[in-house]
Image (cartoon, rainbow, N blue to C red):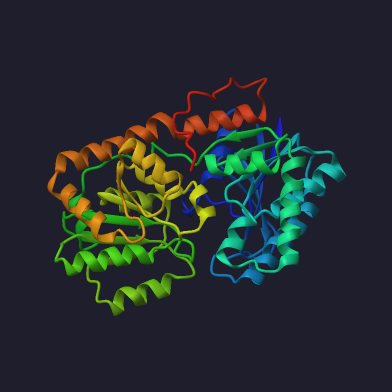
Amino acid sequence: MKVIYIHQYFRTPSEGGAVRSYHLAKGMVDAGINVEIITAGKQKDYDQRWIDGIKVHYLPVAYDQKFGFFKRSKAFYEFSVQAKKLLKKLSRPDLLYITSTPLTTGWIGLWAKRKMAIPYIFEIRDLWPQAPIEVGALKSRFLINYFRRLEKKIYRNALKLVALSPGIASHLRLVSPTSEVFLIPNFSDIQLFKPEQKNTTILNKYGLSDAITIAYTGALGQVNAVEELLDLAKYAQFKKKNWQFLIMGTGSLEIALKKTAESNGLKNVKFIPFGSKEKVKEVLSLADFAWISFAHLPVLKTNSPNKFFDAIAAGNAILVNHKGWVYQLSKQNKLGVSFLPGKLEESFLKLEKLEENSALLLQMKQNSRTLAERYFSKDLAVSKVLQVIDPSKFPANFGNEAYILTA
């Protein structure tokens, strides 16, 4: 069986960032499926590489999270055009596995189904166009109506739909009631990330002590609300706490966040350059808590953030700033503390009590790791994807999913 996997932002663990597609594609290869990936890169010409048994085609379409709306739109359009041209040249696959965002990757699936009679599975990571509408990036009534129609068309023409969270799955069933929807969240790499004792050498490397440490590892964009972590750092410094705050990532607000930390004299905050998954592992090994945050928009409550699944695999307790799916998981499984809007002081007191109660903090950390192992392992996610692709060959692995909650 041959699958062409389409993901505009494909990344490997050595590159860092969202590596879901790498692991799913590798799982397909290990199961005997011939996999080719079509993605985009910053190089000037087409490139092709073999990565762990996966043939990866890199199209020359630059993209950066710092791009504005129109520059992003141009990159989305150009990628779909070049991907269609490449598909004509490649040997025919049995199936396309297409992941969003952006939603515009769905253009490729619609075209391939119509022109080449190739079926496609569509995986939805974020709700689009709802996200840019709520963020305010998409304001044109004409474009909003166009993308809502496109969303329905893509979903209804897909062979199957894969949702990354219960909230996304509910939306898909509402928009496309006749579609077959499967829930396969982001996952924890429990082989790479493990609970570890804080290493003195690594602490010294970053100029840290063995005090309470809170880490954020992820994008530094408009929807990530990392400024709320700086608010906590400011309050902790005011209260003369020796807590430490690590921020690892890159994005459109990186410079602004650094200026905010500097202008407020936050000596307890350290910014660490974006890096590989090994670097993320190193940072999380120093953390007691992982900060999981999003802007307070309804659509963002449905997110299935990689940073959360890395953190629970590493055995970090969780601090979450929004009442979404992650909040529900954290509350139900007693993973940590919520830092909801307007409740900074109240949440701070809970954090102080955890600082004093090492046994309770340790239990929260253990709860995180248990959740990762039981419901969110990489192997479990791969087995589910294989079953979606070819249920006749791969055994069913759905059901008994206690993590399915309504966000």
Q: Please tell me whether residue 225 is drawn above or below residue 38 in the rendered image.
A: below
| Residue 356 seen in render | yes
Picture quadrant where residue 229 is located: bottom left
Q: Say which of 154 and 142 sits in front.
A: 142
Q: Residue at x 48, y 34 (%)?
A: 404
Residue visible at 40% across and 47% down in the picture: 308
In this view, 32 is above or below 21? above
Side of 115 relative to 41 (left or right):
right
Indicate the position of residue 290 as horizontal and vertical percent values.
32, 51
Q: Which residue is pictured at 21% across the width and 51% down the height?
A: 350
Q: Residue furthest right?
A: 115
How many circles with numbers are drawn on the protein? 0
Measuring from the top left, give residue 399's x and y in whole percent: 52, 24
Where does the image place residue 233, in percent across and percent down from the top left? 26, 65
* Residue in front for this viewpoint, 139 or 355: 139
Residue at the limit of the structure toward the bottom, as seen here: 263
Name the quadrant of the N terminus: top right
Give the vertical position of 64 relative to 151 (above or below): below
Q: Is residue 301 left or right of residue 128?
A: left
Q: Position of residue 216 (x, y in %)?
A: 35, 57
Instruction: Describe residue 203's horizontal placement relative to residue 246 as left or right.
Output: left
Residue shown at 84% from the left, 39% from the top: 117
Say whether residue 32 is visible: no
Residue 138's image quarter? bottom right
